[in-house]
Image (spheres, rainbow, N blue to C red):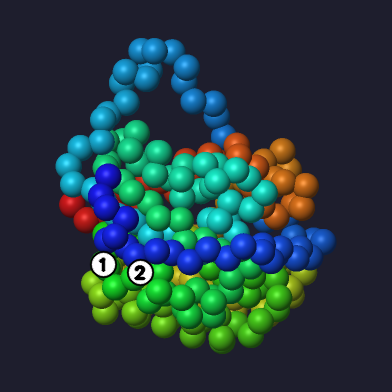
Amino acid sequence: MGSPKVFGKVRERVGMRRMGMIGALALLSACGGKAPEAPAAQASVAAPQGPVVRIVALGDSLFAGYGLRAEQAYPVRLEAALRARGINAQVVNAGVSGDTTEDGLARLDFTLGGAKPDLVVISLGGNDMLRGLPVARTRANMDAILAGLERRKVRVVVMGMLAAPNMGPDYARDFNAVFPAVTKAHHAVLVPFFLQPIFNHPDLQLPDHIHPTAPGVEAMVKGTVDAVSGALPR
């Protein structure tokens, strides 16, 4: 794996600002399976080959691994899934709990550290929605983030978010349209709903009914790894 100097240092924020949940929101779901234990299955996993593929995971608590051990966070498990496919991936976890799209935009340059990664994966917007922030502001922030990465000629995968039903139909209509619109405008790859794999699966949710358990993270990785691997430069 490559030298961490390529990326610079991603700032860590110690206090986790918990995403407050509105009662009707049931945004988590999915299907995680146990990894094969048979030696023959392990032997079939391709060894990572080629130069290091550097990926930055810019996001909120869904990347930071809220309520989980560090090694159970989505970026860590995504790296493992990519390497199991023979991709020599290095995923930098730039998730900060509580971050909004405005926070993500503010730290974009610092997170990249002047280096150009092969791919940036983004999970932002959930806190904007839960706080009822103006949709126009969310869209402007996402547009600015993707425009900055497009100028750098960095490929992007956006993990989309959907509004909670109790936010109202007008808010939901406008908020849900943000992610398809900005990804199309900036030629990014969209995963329509990041939490779809664990939607309506309380067994894959932490007691707060917001964040995934470790098996929930595995289900989210399984549901998104194709999009991520497909977006990598060849």
Quadrant in the picture for the N terminus: top left
Answer yes or no: is residue 193 visible. yes
Please tell me which residue is depicted at 47% across the width and 42% down the height of the picture. Answer: 77
Q: Name which quarter of the figure residue 111 lies in.
A: bottom left
Task: Report the residue marked by disc 2.
Answer: 112
3D distance between C-alphas at marks 1 and 2? 7 Å
Task: Give residue 90's position: percent from left, percent from top.
Answer: 33, 49
Q: Residue at x 66, y 62 (%)?
A: 16
Question: Residue at left 63%, top 67%?
Answer: 98
Left or right, 3 with respect to 82, comes to left
Q: How many marks?
A: 2
In x, y percent, where is residue 184? 37, 73
x and y percentages locating residue 33 in the rendered image: 55, 29
Residue with the most extreme right position: 23
- Badge 2 density bin: few <14, some 14–19, many ≥20, Cα 10 Å: many
Residue type beneath disc 2: Leu
**Residue 121 can be seen, yes or no:** no
Q: Residue at 57% x, 34% y: name it.
A: 32
Mark 2, secondary structure of its residue: helix
In the image, taking residue 116 as reference, residue 192 lies left or right, namely: right
* Most foreground residue, 84 or 71: 71
Disc ID at residue 38:
none
Q: Which residue is disc 1 drawn over?
A: 116
Q: Residues within 10 Å of mark 1 (few under 14, many from 20)?
A: some
Image x and y of residue 229, in percent: 32, 48
The amino acid sitting under disc 1 is: Lys
Q: Is residue 71 above or below residue 12?
A: above
Q: Secondary structure at mark 1?
A: loop
Q: Are marks 1 and 2 in contact (CB under 8 Å)?
A: yes
